[in-house]
Image: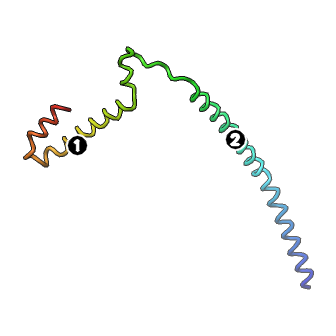
Amino acid sequence: EFQAREAELLQQLEDFNTLWQSKRWPLEQELDSIRQQKAQIDSELQAVIRAAEEEPLPEPPGPDFLAWVDSVAFSVICNCVVALNLLCMALKPRFSEYREIFHAFDQVF
């Protein structure tokens, strides 16, 4: 009796595995297809990125003697000036005793 029940359960497990394999196979195929498409798109993206990095930047418009305006240092200095101006505007109402100093900073900025 136990052997018959064991054989029956083993057959049910085998049937179950067969059923799930048949349902799983299309999903695995689609997953593989998606992964291949993703790899192809990633490859194309890397090729575009490499081409963009190798392409020289166009000359900035305007006269050559103003080319320094397009530099990182100039951008950093401008951002520092804006940040200091914002700081002064925020602190001016709190420290009214330093009104003259803030007025001078206001004129500088």
Which residue is disc 2 drawn over? 39
Q: Image point 36% across, 24% down: which residue?
A: 69
User: Badge 2: how crowded within 10 Å, few (<14), some, or many (20+)?
Assistant: few
User: Badge 1: how crowded within 10 Å, few (<14), some, or many (20+)?
Assistant: few
Q: CA distance from mark 1 to mark 2?
A: 49 Å
Q: Amino acid at mark 1?
A: Leu
Q: For residue 78, which quarter of the picture?
A: top left
Q: For residue 14, which quarter of the picture?
A: bottom right
| Secondary element at tag 1 | helix
The spot of residue 19 in percent (x, y) is 82, 61
Q: In this picture, is 8 found above or below 101?
A: below
- Furthest-top residue in this view: 63
Q: Amino acid at mark 2?
A: Ala
The spot of residue 43 in percent (x, y) is 67, 36
Q: Image point 9% across, 44% down: which residue?
A: 98
Which residue is disc 1 drawn over? 87
The spot of residue 35 in percent (x, y) is 71, 45
Q: Image point 92% across, 82% down: which residue?
A: 3
102 displayed left or right of 85: left
Mark toward the start of the polypeptide (1 vs 2): 2
| Colouring scheme, one of rainbow, by chain, secondary structure, one colour | rainbow
| Secondary element at tag 2 | helix
Q: Image point 89% across, 84% down: which residue?
A: 2
Residue nearest the viewer, comparing 26 with 53 = 53
Say which quadrant the N terminus sits in. Answer: bottom right
Residue nearest the viewer, comparing 93 with 38 = 93
The spot of residue 74 in percent (x, y) is 34, 30
Q: In this picture, is 24 found above or below 62?
A: below
